Amino acid sequence: MIRLAVRCAPEQAERVLAELVELSPGGVEEDWAPDYVEYAIYGPPGELPEMGEIEAVAGAGLVEIESTEIPDDWADRWRDFHKPVWIGERLVVRPSWESAQSAGPSSGPEPAPIEIVVDPGRAFGTGAHATTSMCLELLIEQADTDRDQVARGAMDLGTGSGVLAIAAAKLGYAPVCGCDHEADAVQAAVANAALNGVEVTIERRNLRESPAPFAPLWIANLTAPLLLAVAELMGGDQQPELLLLSGLLVSERERVADAFARRGYRVVGGRERGEWAALRMQYRA
């Protein structure tokens, strides 16, 4: 396993991160220092982006690129970093080797009413990233306020590990479907759905080339360029009633909102956490 680290000037951080997520959909590690930001991606030799691609991404803001071989026990060391993640007091996402109670909120219920077990792997989504947690928060709010929509189902675009689709199913949405372009993600999502005892249909689909399947609710934790591609391919008689969009930087929020506004949607809520943003958008039929 190789760790490829890219250090860039802080003023270039948002652009570099957005591009790296495109090159490495499995996720990006982030570390801020006073005079630089380091992003790291992991993968077997031959499966990581070429140095030239990385240099092009960072451009004039590049400080350093470093490639490091990870010890054989790297997979076991992940256990030191992945802990249960609580979404308010309603839901917890945890790896299989941790109990929900080991990191529960001081005032929260024990055990959690909704518990999702997802082990870190090659598919993005353990609940720890701000984009995932904000999406889960919006999903819980929506399930609590519109039970009629819950009964008509949801679609998770770019499902990754399947954590959002699994959460939707455990909140009562039915049917729940998901799609992802990566074969590893499809396999992981199917396995995780089975592990959590929920019925979720997962298909492989390239959202840059094919319109997203219809569902009353779309949950899309994707990068801004991919969200823009999804908006571009929308059309037809059936439009989702509601969109929960995450994965975008604060600086990209207006552009993404405008793209879906041209398809008939308006912003009715959202979240902001650090440099990340999430949107709730309603169809104006």
Image (cartoon, rainbow, N blue to C red):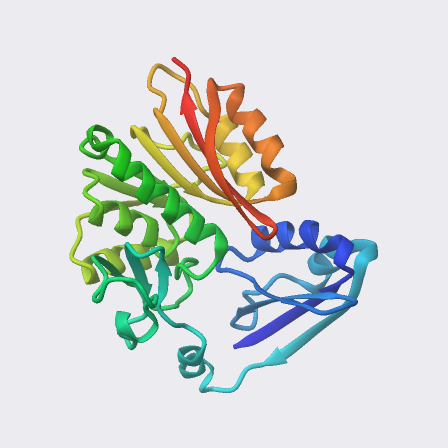
Rendered position, 172 above or below 82:
above
Q: Is residue 63 above or below residue 19?
A: below
Give the camera-side residue of 79 and 146: 146
Viewer-proximal residue among 32 and 225: 32
Residue at 40% across / 79% down in the picture? 79
**What is the x, y in percent for residue 168?**
27, 45
**On the rendered structure, is 202 left or right of 7?**
left
- Whole-percent x and y of residue 188? 32, 59
Residue 192: image quadrant is bottom left
Q: Position of residue 89 (x, y in %)?
A: 31, 57
**In the picture provided, is 200 more to the left or to the right than 12?**
left
Name the side, left or right, on which 200 lies relative to 73: left
Q: Position of residue 190 (x, y in %)?
A: 26, 55
Mark count = 0
| Residue located 42% across and 41% down the image | 220
Q: Residue at x 21, y 49 (%)?
A: 170
Can residue 56 be seen here? The reply is no
Name the residue furthest right.
Answer: 60
Residue at horizontal 30%, vertical 55%? 189
